[in-house]
Image: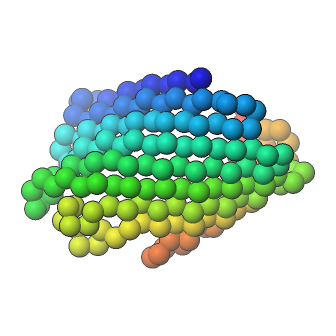
Amino acid sequence: MDMKAGIQFDEDNSNMAGTLSAIMNFNESFKMGAAIDYVDHKTLDTAMQFGLCASYLFDDLYMAVLVTTGDVVVDNYLGQKVGKTTGYELVGAYTMDSWRFLGGYGQVMHDQDDFGYEDADDKKQATMGAEYYFTKNLMGYAEYAIKPNDDIYTVAVQYNF
């Protein structure tokens, strides 16, 4: 089992974030994990999230799912509001020689009325991309993310020292 914990403060200690996670390897192909995150922005909002994930690797095919839920306390011009968030993400990847093809879909849903925002709609995103490994350390990739009101294109090169 792989366990990790972290905590972060800003310079004047007005904001704090912490994470605790654990991942269990059942065999070479199947993993499951859980995490809890806490964020406290003294001047704006506080959030507590809990997530569960699972991944499976079969030869060159990788699949994973993530489910999250949590509470958010927002301080805005309407006063303090408490809301619930729920989200999920599904991803897949297929490796062929030096190429890896990626795809995914995710959505975060929250109680619109609880937050008091007029545009607090469900957030959805579909992503597709490709990576090419020139060497063990050098990779190039392109990605296209589709959102309801915005599309994002990424082209990059990554070198790992």
The answer to whether any part of residue 117 appears in the image is: yes
Give the residue at the far right of this rendering.
97
| 109 displayed left or right of 24 | left
Measured as percent of width and height from the top left, residue 7 is found at 38, 27
Residue depicted at x 26% and y 66%: 112
Measured as percent of width and height from the top left, residue 102 is found at 71, 58
Up/down of 34 relative to 62, above or below: above
Give the residue at the far front of this rendering.
26
Up/down of 40 relative to 127, above or below: above
Q: Quadrant of the N terminus?
A: top right
| Among the 4 quarters of the image, the one containing residue 105 | bottom right
Q: Quadrant of the C terminus?
A: top right
Measured as percent of width and height from the top left, residue 153 is found at 61, 67
Measured as percent of width and height from the top left, residue 127 is found at 61, 64
Residue depicted at x 34% and y 55%: 85
Residue depicted at x 57% and y 31%: 23
Q: Nearer the viewer, residue 18 or 143?
A: 18
| 74 displayed left or right of 52 | left
| Among the 4 quarters of the image, the one containing residue 145 | bottom right
| 20 displayed left or right of 129 | left
Q: Nearer the viewer, residue 132 or 120?
A: 120
Residue depicted at x 19% and y 53%: 82
